[in-house]
Image (cartoon, rainbow, N blue to C red):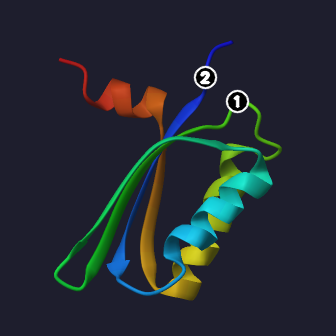
Amino acid sequence: MERELLFITVIGEDKKGIVARISMLLYECGINIEDINQRIMDRYFVMTMLVDMKDSKEGMKEIRERLEGIGRELQLEIQIQHEKIFNMMHRV
């Protein structure tokens, strides 16, 4: 079965619950976390995720809107990009 991968990046001031909120949203949408990397740089939280949305109950637009809502609520910059777009932008 082919995967449908997305890159999610999250940057903002560190606070409790960031990973929980985003991972719960992904779970609710039927999205699997393939890889995750997070760290605190000074007082800033930085996270990158590679997720598979092949079994998602929602489309890319709805997922983006829901993530943007979490971003507004928690004052985070959250970006989402489909793997195909990423690959096209980084072709040599």
Who is closer to the viewer here, 51 or 6? Answer: 51
Type of residue at label 2? Arg
| Mark 1 touches mark 2? (CB < 8 Å) | yes
Who is closer to the viewer here, 43 or 70? Answer: 43
In the image: residue 46, left or right of residue 57: left
Type of residue at label 1? Lys
Whether residue 17 is situated above or below residue 88 in the rendered picture = below
Whether residue 90 is situated above or below residue 64 in the rendered picture = above
In the image: residue 25, left or right of residue 4: right
Who is closer to the viewer here, 45 or 71? Answer: 45
The residue drawn where x is 77% and y is 33% is 55
Question: Which residue is outermost to the top?
Answer: 1
> Can I make out residue 65 in this image?
no
Q: What mark, if any, has residue 26 been given in the picture?
A: none
Whether residue 82 is situated above or below residue 45 in the rendered picture = above
Q: Quadrant of the N terminus?
A: top right
Dot 2 corresponds to which residue?
3
Dot 1 corresponds to which residue?
54
Of helix, strand and loop, which one carries label 2?
loop
- Looking at the image, tell me whether mark 1 or mark 2 is earlier in sequence order: 2
